[in-house]
Amino acid sequence: MSLDRYAVFGHPVAHSLSPRIHSWFAEQTGERIDYRAFEAPLDDFAGTLRDFFASGGRGANVTVPFKGEASMLADERDARVERSGAANTLRRDADGRIRAFNTDGIGLLRDLVHNLGVDLAGRSVVLLGAGGAAAGVIEPLLEAGPACLIIGNRTPRRAQELARRFADLGPVAAEALADLPAADVIINATAASLDGGLPELAPGVVKSQTFAYDMVYAARPTPFLARCRELGAARTADGLGMLVEQAAEAFLIWRGVRPDTGGVLTRLRASVAEV
Ligand code: ATR
């Protein structure tokens, strides 16, 4: 019997760890799936995705820069996708319809709260970035009950627009990068780390008890995490745990079983460090 087919689509996608993570999940749960990475052309993500599902594909993960398009192309969107405009998980159901989900936010929360023991309730949380990556995590962050969630972005207008879009869900506001308040938790959701860049950071934002998190992962501290350390942050973490947790949520959506993430994260961390 042929295996059910899943894939991650991105551009670039060659270095994606998702095929490895999902093959380990499949091994662990006994689910028989085939999961690959496909680089979609920047101007024809829609066609690539259509071909994949037309040829029997059951589900897809979607990464940079296609999360917005994935949301628009789906036949149905869950409430989080509807509001954020970004989807990272698609599922083709028996009725042939493509349904869109976003597991990034729940993945981030699982990593912060469950794996890293970071308490967000009553805390001052700063989110850097106002693109799809940031939009996808605002709702679950607000559900964790922070005292405030302040969005800072290089282009302030985008941060203001995002804050307005989520304002009915909790205490969220936008601030200019230079005016960000001191943060208990600061999260980098900009694309800056992807090309070795760094979002501008006013020194007062980071203090010794600040927990700094970069949604990007790397073998070495990202420039953002290195800068936060320089500014005195005692604790930092990259996004490898979020990657594994969002993948586990996608696996649950597709297969109805949530893999155990602890062992997979340890194994993945070791393999990333070897590169
Ligand atoms: P994504 O879906 O990954 O969030 P995006 O919608 O292109 O991608 O958004 C990228 C985010 O990273 C934006 O917040 C962008 O800031 P602007 O809105 O000002 O463009 C931010 N970003 C990218 N490179 C950056 C850099 N070198 N410094 C600071 N912010 C950067």
Image: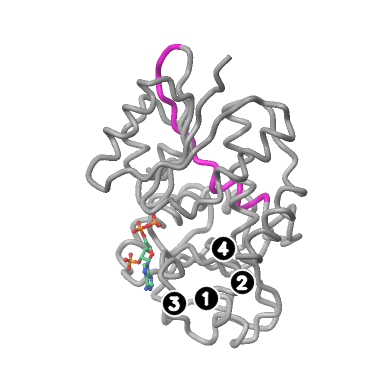
Q: Secondary structure at mark 2?
A: strand
Where in the image, quadrant-wise, is ligand 1 located? bottom left
For the image shown, how many numbered marks are present on the structure? 4
Q: Position of residue 225 (x, y in %)?
A: 58, 75
Three-letter amino acid code at disc 1? Phe
**Labels 1, 2: front one:** 1
Could you tell me which secondary element the residue under label 1 belongs to?
helix
Of the two numbered discs 4 and 1 on the same chain, state the one appearing first in sequence. Answer: 4
Instruction: Provide the secondary structure element on which disc 3 rests.
Output: loop
Return the residue at label 2.
212
Residue 17 visible to the viewer: yes
Q: Position of residue 22 (x, y in %)?
A: 61, 39
> Is 105 covered by the magenta stretch?
yes
Question: Residue 217 got which mark?
Answer: 4
Label whose residue precedes the other's in the sequence (4 or 2):
2
The Cα–Cα distance between marks 4 and 1, rounded to whole angstroms, is: 11 Å
Tell me if label 1 and label 2 are in contact, CB under 8 Å.
yes
Specify the amino acid type for callout 2: Ala
**Which part of the image, by quadrant, shows the N terminus?**
top right
> Where residue 65 sits in the image (x, y, percent)?
35, 51
- The answer for how far apart the CA atoms under marks 3 and 4 are is 14 Å
Looking at mark 3, is its residue's CB closer than 8 Å to ligand 1?
Answer: yes
The residue singled out by tag 1 in the image is 224
Residues marked 4 and 1 touching at CB (< 8 Å): no
The C terminus: image quadrant = bottom right
CA distance for labels 1 and 3: 6 Å
Q: Which residues are magenta?
A: 95-110
Between 195 and 23, the residue placed more toward the observer is: 23
Amino acid type at image mark 4: Tyr
Q: Please report whichever mark, 1 or 2, sits nearer to the chain's N-terminal start.
A: 2
**10 Å crowding of disc 2: few (<14), some (14-19), many (20+):** many
The residue under the point 61% across, 63% down is 147
